[in-house]
Image (cartoon, rainbow, N blue to C red):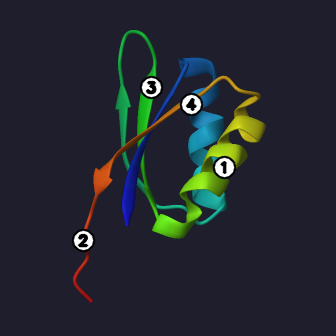
Amino acid sequence: MLLAEVEVDHQRAGRLENDLRASGRPVRAVHYGARGVRIEVGLPSAEAGAFGTWLADTTAGAATLRMAGTEYTAT
């Protein structure tokens, strides 16, 4: 699973977190800072490109996406 970091302003953060959870994407952590909010999201590898498009549409281009690494889950 890929780890993505999404940065967004405080005004949009709550709505975005809710939209992420409603879409079935696992929110790993939420970090609130003075300049904005960073949300860590788990993504299947095949979904990375589609997620960027979804994020741009959902936030009207107001969020920044950064792929942060890979997480392995034992099954």
Query: Mark 1 sits on what residue?
Result: 19
Q: Label for residue 59?
A: none
Q: Earlier in the sequence, mark 4 or mark 1?
A: 4
Q: Earlier in the sequence, mark 1 or mark 2?
A: 1
Q: Earlier in the sequence, mark 1 or mark 3?
A: 1
Secondary structure beneath label 3: strand
Asked whether residue 44 is in view, the answer is: no
Q: CA distance from mark 3 to mark 4?
A: 6 Å
Q: CA distance from mark 1 to mark 2?
A: 24 Å
73 is higher (above) or lower (below) than 70: below
Secondary structure beneath label 2: loop
Q: CA distance from mark 4 to mark 1?
A: 10 Å
Question: What percent of the width, then of the height, locates residue 56?
Answer: 70, 36
Query: Mark 3 sits on what residue?
Result: 37
**Which quadrant would the C terminus be assigned to in this image?**
bottom left
Question: What percent of the width, then of the height, locates residue 34?
Answer: 37, 10
| Residue type highlighted by circle 3 | Val
Asked whether residue 5 is in view, the answer is: yes
Q: Earlier in the sequence, mark 2 or mark 4?
A: 4
